[in-house]
Image: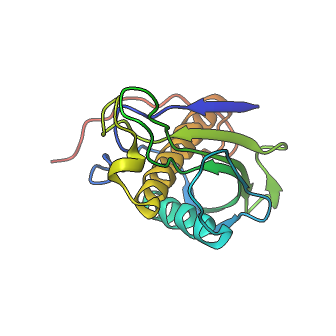
Amino acid sequence: MMTVATLAACNGASDLGDAPTPLGDFNLHHNIVVAPKAQKGPLSREVSKDELAAAVQAATAERFDRYDGERFYHFGISVEGYVLAQPGVPLVFAPKSILILNLTVWDDAKNKKLNPEPHQITVFESLDQGPVIGSGYTKSAEEQLKNLSQNAAKSIENYLVKQNREEGWFNGGRAVASPSEPEDK
């Protein structure tokens, strides 16, 4: 199964100051990111496989360390490919950055994968530079990678919310409807 998440309208980290989206008993214990087979796309800037893995791991931790549910879950993430845009020719060619990864989610208590096949996620850079000027003109490779990694972490969160709603991943294995509860003040 493949998901293409464009998350292009805003940065994937724009909501980190807000309360996390509810995910039941979810608590990320192991955040394992590897990139041994990561393929550099055409016309991409160079970045090491270690830098790829570290950026995705940091963005994943930044987003998911906010969850403190009662049960441990683990991520196995493999970076499959990337393009970090180089400067193009404004109005003619403004390349965009992209990151592709595979995600496996493990339930620690059940000692099993929640998704038997890795879930593929593809994200693009945020379009905060406008449609004409590519990020290669205005951002370093490190800034592009951070943006892509934050967008990937947000896309992972969206996937987990969907799976929890449809499959009950983080509610003791059963899907439950979330009733609206008034906030305590």
- Residue 81 falls left or right of residue 158: right
Q: In this rendering, is residue 83 above or below 124?
A: below
Q: Position of residue 131 (x, y in %)?
A: 35, 28
- Residue 131 visible: yes
- Image position of 180 (left or right of 54): left
Does residue 43 sit above or below 180 in this rendering? below
Mark yes or no: residue 20 visible: no
Residue 172 vertical placement versus 37 (above, below): above
Tell me where residue 24 appears, x and y as whole percent: 52, 47
Residue 98's x, y, as percent? Answer: 56, 43
Q: Position of residue 79 (x, y in %)?
A: 69, 55
Q: Which residue, as the protein is rendered here, is positioned at the far left?
A: 185
Count of number-bearing discs: 0
Q: Which residue is depicted at the point 76% across and 31% down?
A: 1
Question: Which residue is pictured at 80% across the width and 59% down the height?
Answer: 37
Between 125 and 163, the residue placed more toward the observer is 125
From the viewer's perspective, is 104 left or right of 64? right
Q: Quadrant of residue 108?
A: bottom right
Q: 104 and 86: which one is in front? A: 86
Residue at horizontal 28 percent and vertical 49 percent from the top: 18
Query: For residue 128, which quarter of the picture?
Result: top left
Closer to the camera in the image, 111 or 11: 11
- At x 31% / y 46%, what residue is drawn? 15
